[in-house]
Every structure is written in C-alpha cells, then in structure tokens.
Image: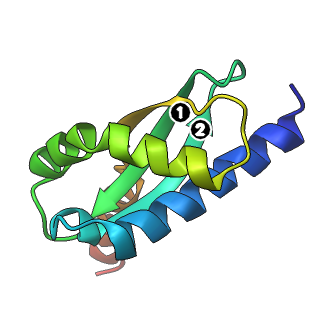
Amino acid sequence: MQTVKLERYNNAFMEELNIILGTEVKNPLLKKVVVTSVKITNDLSFAKVYFTCFNEDQKEVLKELKDSSSYLRGELSKRVDIRHTPELNFCYDESLEYAKRIEEKIKEIKK
C-alpha cells in the first residue's frame, strides 16, 4: 500500500469522525470530543483513533466512544471510499496535556 494513499485515508477518517461527533451524535458527552489524529494499519484492518476532550472524564468518554464504535464505523463506511472499513480503537491523546506541562515548566524556569 502506498503511504500517500494511507495518509489520505487517515485524514479522511479524522475529518469525517470530527463531523460525525460534532454534529450528528446525540450523546452530549461525545459532542465535546475532538479527534486529533488517526493511524490506520498497513493492512487496513485497524484504525487507532486519538482523541481529546476538554473538561471531561476521559475514562467515561473512552467508554462511550467504544460503545459507539460500531455506529461510527458504519457511518465512516458510507462516507469514505474504502473497500473494508477498519475496526476503530480509541486512545486518549495525551500530547496536549504533555505540551501544557512543558509550557508550565518553562514558565517556572523563566521566573
């Protein structure tokens, strides 16, 4: 598989998931979720979906996302032209929190 094609799928999945979560799901907890990136395996069987949520319990959000994964996967299969829609695995993206901690440390050092 070409890496350009895989990157296109990653971006398409991320865009579509953000649209679905932001506008179409009924669960108010999931409306606050932002998908930060998607990494699809080379064989297209799995997609690791990284997300963040602001001021929410990430464990509760993760549980709700897992419960909604079949619905989300079905919606993706209708919107993204791909032969086999990969199984979605959700992971909390800690990079934003990590960046905040580093920024705070830098501010402390400057003082």
Which numbered disc covers residue 39? Answer: 2
- Residue 83 occupies which quadrant of the picture? top right
Q: Nearer the viewer, residue 85 or 43?
A: 85
Residue 7 x %, y %: 76, 45
Q: Nearer the viewer, residue 58 or 103?
A: 58
Query: Gap between marks 2 and 1, in whole Å?
Result: 6 Å
Note whether 42 is above or below 56 in the view shown: above
- Residue 92 occupies which quadrant of the picture? top left
Q: Nearer the viewer, residue 27 or 91?
A: 27
Which numbered disc covers residue 47? Answer: 1
Note whether 55 is above or below 86 in the view shown: below
Hey, what amino acid is under mark 2? Lys
Q: Is residue 32 visible?
A: yes
User: Mark 2 or 1 closer to N-term?
Assistant: 2
Q: Is residue 106 visible?
A: no
Note whether 47 is above or below 75 in the view shown: above
